[in-house]
Image (cartoon, rainbow, N blue to C red):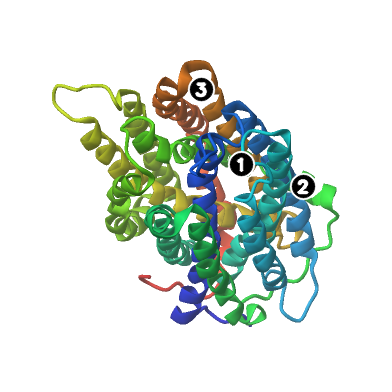
Amino acid sequence: MRKQLPLWGKIAYGAGSVGWVLLDRVMMTWLYYFYITSPVKGVNSFTGAALFGLIMFGGRVIDAIADPIIAGLSDNHRGRLGRRIPFMLWSGIFYVLVFIALFYPPVKGESPWNGLHLFIFLGLFFTFFTGYVCPYLALLAELAHTEADRVDLTTYRSIFYMVGGAMGMLGSGFLIGRLGFHGMVWAAAAIALPFLYIPALIKEKDYTDARPATMGLLQALRSTLQNRPFIIYLAGSIALQMGYNIFTINLPLYATALLGKTEAEATVFFLAQATALIAFPLLNYVTKKIGLKKALSLTMLLFIAALPFTSLLSDALTFLSPELLLFAIMGLMGIAQVGIMVIPDAIVASIADLEEKRSGQRREAMYFGTQGLLVKAAMGGSALVSGGLVQFFGTTRGVQLSGPAAALVVLAGLLVFSRFPEKEVAALRGKAAAENVPRVKGM
């Protein structure tokens, strides 16, 4: 009989997210800036903005293809350490090494070789990212057995996510000022590596009785895409992630290109996202009261309300300075980020439970992998949108328009997600929920 995950296990699981989020945030926050403006002395840029967007999209396509492949391998894996931990152990070190290589283009100045370098290492970066994160997320669905426990576990994980994100966005700017750009990259890699291996302290097989799945890749993917609630959820999630990544890619540029701040000064604005500290316990409580669907819908509404105001940055306002406006936007986005971190994966875990009733097999990784395939393609699209806006409207206006563009994408996703059949999912899960371990109150 499976055990219930203790507090130390929740902490160990959550700690792993510091490692992968730290490197992902540094990459998402600074790679675009690094390649199109180049903080390296004597170099104006390594690639053009539109080319960077195209290459990022190509890297995301490679990443998207890797998702279902790795998910299928993880679901079907037979080994003494379980189905998830082995993939995390192997992927962690390569993820760190490729991250470092991304920031070492071979030619000083714009060159096709830099574009090729970026394409190759972005593809590898996203592949090893998936090799770690897809099994990591699937492990959540196996370690927590009720909706309340999953909200708790995603909350713990998200707290560590914020720690990694703060290191990646706030700490990186500080380190650039102290160590230079490449010094920051090496420091981030050194911090991230040990965190990636903390979840391995959990003996996976003690907390799950799931057996390896037997479906082939195409059969498993087809079965997953026949789950109607999952498809509706995906449409909303893809739009939300795309909007969020348009915002994230442009974060440094809001302060540097629009407000004329340095890289180190730009990180001061990121501090406004500390509103997330208040949002964590509040969202955990509210989500259990109103349900996952309403909580995610509120998250999307926050994006729609906050992001259009980037169009006013660098313009004179009669009642608010551009600096204060950026702080306000960041504060609202800090709250909205918590919703992105806590709610979607809890929804996927609940939907994945339906698969056991449909096919008799536990295939959590394929659900997370299928989500990753489509969401990451959309994230590549966010780079295309950002690069295209700068290319066609110029840096200042293009960056200003990134927020309204992101808000429109999220609005479209909200309209589709409003049809998510939450009551139907809960009803179908009823029998399985009754067979789970006793529900635990609180976090």
Of the residues tagged 1 and 2, which is closer to the observer?
1
Going from the N terminus, do you reach mark 1 or mark 3 first? Answer: 1
The amino acid sitting under disc 3 is Leu
Image position of 357 (left or right of 72): left
Outermost residue, top side: 392
The front one of 46 and 252 is: 46
Count of all numbered marks drawn on residues in the image? 3
Q: Which residue is mark 2?
A: 221
Q: Which residue is mark 1?
A: 375
Calculate the distance from the C-alpha at mark 1 to the C-alpha at mark 2.
15 Å
Q: How many other residues sit within 10 Å of disc 3, few (<14), some (14-19) or many (≥20)?
A: many
Quarter of the picture holding the N terminus: bottom right
Q: Residue 389 bears which disc, if any?
A: 3
Relative image position of residue 357 (x, y in whole percent): 69, 57
Residue located at (48% from left, 45% from top): 29
The amino acid sitting under disc 2 is Leu
Q: How many other residues sit within 10 Å of disc 1, few (<14), some (14-19) or many (≥20)?
A: many
| Above or below, 433 relative to 116 | below
In terms of image quadrants, where is residue 227?
top right
The reply to whether dot 1 and dot 2 touch (C-beta < 8 Å) is no
Q: How many other residues sit within 10 Å of disc 2, few (<14), some (14-19) or many (≥20)?
A: some
Of the residues tagged 1 and 3, which is closer to the observer?
3
Q: Secondary structure at mark 3?
A: helix
The front one of 273 and 372 is: 273
| Above or below, 129 relative to 64 | below
Calculate the distance from the C-alpha at mark 1 to the C-alpha at mark 3.
21 Å
The reply to whether dot 1 and dot 3 touch (C-beta < 8 Å) is no
